[in-house]
Amino acid sequence: MQIRIRRGWEIPEAHATPEAVVMARRSLLGAGAGLLAGTGAAQAQWLSPSRLFQAPVKEQPRKPLAAARNARFVAGRDITEEIHATTYNNYYEFGTSKSIVAPAQALVLEPWTVRIEGMVANPRTVGLEELLKQVTLEERVYRFRCVEAWAMTVPWVGFPMAELLRIAEPQAGAKYVVFSTLADEKIMPGIREGFYPFPYTEGLTLAEAANELAFMAVGMYGKTLPPQNGAPFRFITPWKYGFKQAKSIVKISFTDKRPVGFWEALQAEEYGFWANVNPAVPHPRWSQARERLLGSGEMVPTQIWNGYGTFVADLYKGLEKERLFA
Ligand SMILES: Nc1nc2c(c(=O)[nH]1)N[C@H]1C(S)=C(S)[C@@H](COP(=O)(O)O)O[C@H]1N2
Ligand SMILES: [Mo]
């Protein structure tokens, strides 16, 4: 067995690298893990990979997607430069590095259909275009916080998740909505590898899904989403860690049982169902007190609920016994 000792400057950026999972499964990731992962790691300054320093990639064209900005949501931070938000990604189906722009171009975005099923009035498959005819697109600038302690501020284009619920018509007994994402071994090396529990799924309570912050995104920076950011359809819940926010959604199901998401299935001690941002609750392997802004590399304090408490804190009244922040 190979045990890799991380050096101080190596940020534990992969949520769970294959080796970390193997180590956890062998119960070796106990008290020593903090030492290995390095407490100073999250403070390290990292340059986001830029296209300037990489082999040129022929990216899929993105269609302009003009939508009025919703002034109710004020990010209070500069918008991250598009080059950084669209080149520093987590999309494990295409590989565990942050530089998956090139392989992600293999995604076939049209036609795209979404299966709506489970506890709904009419289980059915809808074309994304058809779905978009039933909603009004708007732009929202949201802060985004990955559990790995990096953050960005992005102008997303999309529509409220509440609208999706209206269209899907969940039955009275439904309690959760579960989003499943594309798993196509022909184009996704991560699926072929067979290591991770794909398809990637993440779920929300219906109360969370109906919250006005919850957003279905089809675009960013005034254009359709690029493949690497989860084209053509993903969800955004800015008060939760990034791993909840599933990309390239192909199925939306409604259920009365709490779903086990991709990360919880992989590492339940580190990633739970709720995954709300909280600087006071460290990840078992690193601090969540601060976050590194993509682009500038500036370290800034993390806020509880990622600063969105006025919108969402009430959702969790009475749930204090739950592991709300992991
Ligand atoms: N299908 C899928 N969705 C995913 C992921 C993934 O690997 N696969 N990674 C998640 C994680 S960990 C983060 S931080 C965000 C990253 O989104 P971005 O690349 O657009 O910044 O996507 C989330 N959604
Ligand atoms: Mo993440």
Image (cartoon, rainbow, N blue to C red):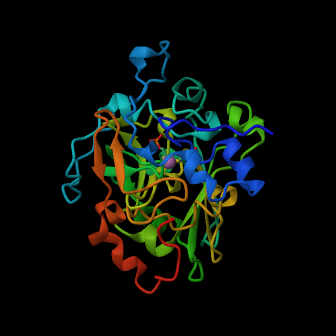
Looking at the rendered image, the quarter that the N terminus falls into is: top right
Q: Is residue 167 visible in this depiction of the protein?
A: yes
Residue 26 at x, y percent in the picture: 78, 54
**In front of the other: 34 or 262:** 34
Which residue occupies the extreme bottom position in the image? Answer: 318
| Total numbered labels placed on residues in the image | 0
User: Camera-side residue: 44 or 193?
Assistant: 44
Q: Is residue 197 visible?
A: no
Q: Position of residue 110 (x, y in %)?
A: 56, 34
Q: Is residue 276 left or right of residue 312?
A: right
Is residue 314 toward the left or the right of residue 281 in the image?
Answer: left
Q: Observer-nearest residue: 256 or 260?
A: 260
Residue 4 drawn at (x, y percent): 67, 37
Direction right: furthest residue: 1
* x 44%, y 24%: residue: 61
Q: Residue furthest top?
A: 55
Drawn side of residue 269 relative to residue 324, left or right: right
* 225 vs 326: above or below: above
Q: Residue at x 37, y 35 (%)?
A: 45
Which residue is depicted at the point 32% across and 56% down? 302
Residue at (64% x, 55% y) in the render: 262
Residue 259 place in picture, x, y as percent: 64, 68
